[in-house]
Amino acid sequence: MVSSAAPSPPMGLIAEITHRCPLQCAYCANPLELTVPARELSTEQWRRVIDQSAKIGVLQFHFTGGEPLARKDLPELVAHAAKAGLYTNLITSGVLLDEAMMAALLAAGIDHIQLSFQEADAAAADHFGGYKGGHAKKLAAAARIRAAGLALTLNFVIHRQNMHHLPAMLALAEALQADRVEVAHAQYYGWALVNRAALLPTREQLDAANRQVAEARARLEGKIAIDYVVPDYYAARPKACMGGWGNRFIHIAPDGKALPCHAAESIPGMQFASVREMGLAEIWRHDPAFARFRGTDWMPEPCRSCDRREIDWGGCRCQALALTGDAAATDPACAKAPAHGVIEAIIAAPVENPPPLTPRRLKGM
Amino acid sequence: MSAAPTADTGNGAAVPRFRRGVKLRHDAARGQWVLLAPEKAFVLDAIAAEILKLVDGARSLEGIASDLAQRFNAPRDVVSADIAAALADLARKGAIEW
């Protein structure tokens, strides 16, 4: 049963404007099946999405990818979003953020930039990013963002092979005068799921990271805010994925598919509407895909009678699918889930010698 | 940079301002004021909205208090303490600096 009450307006729209990217991170959140440039929405189509977003109550518009700067019309789209009254956020690797692009984004009215780093050490960072000289370009980009007076967040994805340098990463954020730092353990979907055995930390590594983050938070209080995402394989309760399915966010794929989360297309049998054919208001309120796991009516036990059902929202549908074969199951990350044993078996079998990483690549490029 | 006011003595001369990347917006779809920040949105009650509309990086805490006390015909010391508390809360959340 799907609740017939109209959902409250979405808080944010995540615009995955392209899958093109100069980097090849093995934990990329993009799907394995990347969208080719010819299938990307046009500038005009994105402008329409922006207008519709503002109209239905989206507050924050996140430009991401791939590498969003791979699209030459990004400043134009940012300007359009700023003019529509949206808070504009850019999530970038920074390697294409040269002086001219910084000036164009500033003139367009960008509000906040999230800059990703793969490591604190240049050689290691270039290794994980698969892009020689990338780290140096990121450092230059951080300096440009700082000089422009913009709010700067540094994003670090940490995993088994780089987390011993977490203190150096936090020191880098301090040296670059970031306002915020996001330290997120790789989440095992798409490319990161393929590479899980090489990325999943040991319990000891995780304990050390937890301590280091707690220390840094105390030391940098009032100066740099640190957001920390633990790998939910080690958590007793699942993450509230996307703040609940169809509850807070709309994700638009490069080809215009409107998704409740970036990995939703991995769920077999689901049809997703495209902004090429349907308006955002209609999609948000009436698309069966958004309604499918919205709220609590869809939930099985033990979620249905759990007092955390409106905190966790049953966890993550794509993870339930990936680990149990059933997207409607309780997320196995939850200790109360019938399939929690799957997670316990994975973390109980640490890999002595992690296999080589499979880099993210767009076929035919 | 001026010193943050304290709960006991206050510091009326302190000038609050929004931190980098923080913006006050009226949200027409929900009919309310919101404070937007990196990866965060704060929904504001009517009082907080009136306070934040006067945060411009030039006006002091006392300046804001005088304006609101007069407009709402309320005792100035009470208004001043309420504003200091509201702004201290937002400072802790990383939205306001002094």
Image: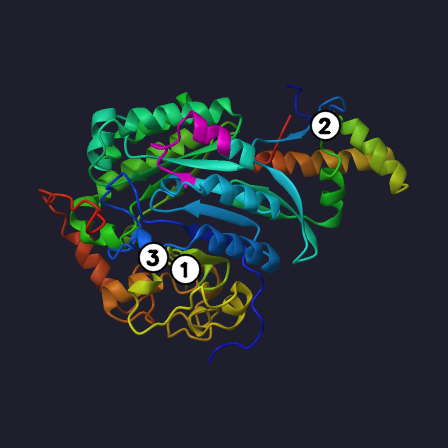
In the current view of this chain or complex, which residue is farthest to the bottom? A1
Q: Which residues are magenta?
A: A91-104
Q: Chain of mark 3?
A: A
Q: Quadrant of residue A153?
A: top left
Above or below — where is A320 with respect to A40?
below
Label 1 sits on a secondary structure element that is loop
Magenta stretch: residue A92 in it? yes
Which tag is nearer the camera, tag 3 or tag 1?
3
On screen, residue A202 versus residue A301, left or right, reads left
Label 2 sits on a secondary structure element that is loop
How crowded is the residue under tag 1: few (<14 C-alpha within 10 Å), some, or many (20+)?
Answer: many
What type is the residue that disc 1 sits on?
Answer: Gly
Task: Name the residue carrying label 2.
Answer: B8
Task: Name the residue carrying label 1.
Answer: A256
Task: Name the residue carrying label 3.
Answer: A39
The residue positioned 54% from the left and 48% from the top of the image is A60
On screen, residue B77 versus residue A99, left or right, reads right
State the CA–CA distance, disc 3 to disc 2: 61 Å
Which tag is nearer the camera, tag 2 or tag 1?
1
What type is the residue that disc 2 sits on?
Answer: Asp
How crowded is the residue under tag 2: few (<14 C-alpha within 10 Å), some, or many (20+)?
Answer: few
Label 3 sits on a secondary structure element that is helix
Q: Look at the image and tell me whether residue A177 can be seen.
A: no
Here the colouring is: rainbow
Above or below — where is A190 with respect to B93?
below
Residue A295 spot, x, y in % from top left: 48, 69
Residue contact between numbered discs 2 and 1, judged by CB atoms under 8 Å: no
| Labels 3 and 1 in the same subunit | yes
Q: Look at the image and tell me whether residue A225 can be seen.
A: yes
